[in-house]
Amino acid sequence: QTNQQWGGRFTESTDAFVQAFTASVSFDRRMYRQDIAGSLAHATMLHEAGVLSAADHAAIVQGLEAIRDEIERGEFDWSVALEDVHMNIEARLTARIGDAGKRLHTGRSRNDQVATDIRLYLRDAIDAILAELRRLQGGLVDLAEREADTIMPGFTHLQVAQPVTFGHHLLAWFEQLKRDSGRLRDCRARLNLCPLGAAALAGTTYPIDRQRSAELLGFSGPTENSLDSVSDRDFAIELCAAGALLMTHLSRFSEELVLWASAQFGFVDIPDRFCTGSSIMPQKKNPDVPELVRGKAGRVNGHLVALLTLMKGQPLAYNKDNQEDKEPLFDTVDTLLGSLRAFADMVPALRARPERMRAAARQGFATATDLADYLVRKGVAFRDAHEIVGKAVRLGVDSGRDLAEMTLDELRGFSAVIEADVFACLTLEGSVAARDHYGATAPAQVRAAVARARAWLATD
Ligand code: ARG
């Protein structure tokens, strides 16, 4: 017995291994809801165009809705012999409603059908990803507000550079995520076009209304060119590219949390419920959530490369290669949703350890630049001031003291312009408060940035 979907042309049935090898139902069945929505819209458009009778249309609508219920109740019998989600549902429809089911595929191909399904699926996925992203961003803004005055060392080259406020550091992460959100929304807007009607590749001979199909599915319009419609997977690549960059950000964030949660830094405490222990070392509390997210960034990068490589050699229009788009894409969506959820849950629970942050800033001569700026205000040229402060730091290193711990006489030994007012600019508070302009680290500026971030979240 030959395959029921295309048996007419064939003289023998598909090899059993080939059947399993070419099937995609094990993974594309997750698009069942989008597949049914696409079929409902197609059937309604066909009926309105006079291609499908009212009776057939009614039977198809009722049949597809019943099938959706069957799937959701876990009663649907998925068959590898029927290859993919599209043919499984269509075969079931015909089994349920008879000949009307066989008319559904009029003026349609699996090529435009699958392109539609993926776009619908990604549209929903992007909305879910954006919701988790917002939750994480909201958590960062709340924490930034609470930690607007908390002083920590800022780093370059992972060496203590200048003091910053913890709130300012948290808002740097917020900005990264804001760009990610913009990229995802761009991707959503560009993919929101309907390929239905492109059929296999050239369009169809029926008097279809592509605008109507698009409208019924909430697309902003039909895709322009039928060949492009069935061969384009740019939207999948764009999602993976935006996802890879988002995961790169979460990975950098993770790296800092892992460092900061170590005994050597001790800047933050990650609550136990986000950590795990060791099966051998009783003392261990490991920051598994950020470590795992840092690791998962690698798989999304891999999916992006997989999709780019999948597409690069394909001639127009549809090729079976495209079936390979789904697993990387679905795994990208799952990885993004899981990683964002873990972070959105964890960030509000992070506890800062300000005394550890202060101690680290003190040890690192974080206010050396402030002393140089002080000398400049007293008339010394910046390059000379740099040299003078360098010598003072040398003394501090040798004698194990911070600049603020030196006596006025000691400091005056490096430059006679130094007076008692110098100590005000050597404090950590004085240093951060002095960086008081748009985008800088002063607590007042952090509060202003928090307000802008909240406004962005409100209109987003
Ligand atoms: N399962 C296929 C895919 O994922 C559906 C389209 C198949 N079309 C075809 N002519 N073989 O792309």
Image: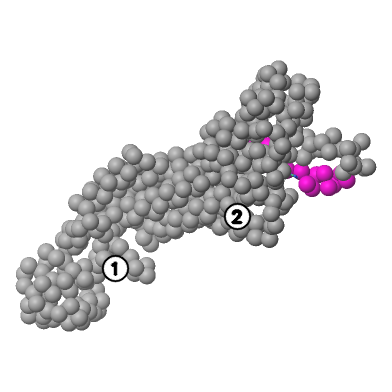
Earlier residue among tags 1 and 2:
1
Identified at 17% across, 82% down, the residue is: 384
Q: Position of residue 64 (x, y in %)?
A: 68, 25
* Mark 2 lies on residue: 303
Q: Which residues are magenta?
A: 15-31
Answer with left or right where residue 253 lies relative to residue 25.
left
The image quarter in which residue 299 lies: bottom right
Q: Position of residue 235 (x, y in %)?
A: 56, 49
Q: Position of residue 111 (x, y in %)?
A: 70, 43
Answer with left or right where residue 282 lies relative to residue 6.
left
* Mark 1 lies on residue: 161
Q: Residue furthest right?
A: 11
Quadrant the N terminus occupies: top right
Q: For the residue carrying disc 1, how many other residues have a C-alpha within 10 Å: few (<14), some (14-19), or many (20+)?
A: some
Instruction: Name the element at disc 2.
Output: helix
Query: In the displayed structure, would residue 314 be above or below residue 6?
Result: below
Answer with left or right where residue 309 lies relative to residue 352.
right
Query: In the displayed structure, would residue 139 be above or below residue 375?
Result: above
Identified at 6% across, 69% down, the residue is: 420
- Image quarter for ligand 1 equals top right
Query: In the displayed structure, would residue 41 be above or below residue 232?
Result: above
The amino acid type of the residue labelled 2 equals His
The amino acid type of the residue labelled 1 equals Ala
Q: Position of residue 152 (x, y in %)?
A: 28, 58
Cα distance, mark 1 to mark 2? 37 Å
Quadrant the C terminus occupies: top left
Instruction: Give 108 or 371, whichever is nearer the viewer.
Output: 108
Numbered disc in front, either 1 or 2? 2
Q: For the residue carrying disc 2, how many other residues have a C-alpha within 10 Å: few (<14), some (14-19), or many (20+)?
A: many
Identified at 79% across, 22% down, the residue is: 98
Residue 416 in the magenta stretch? The answer is no
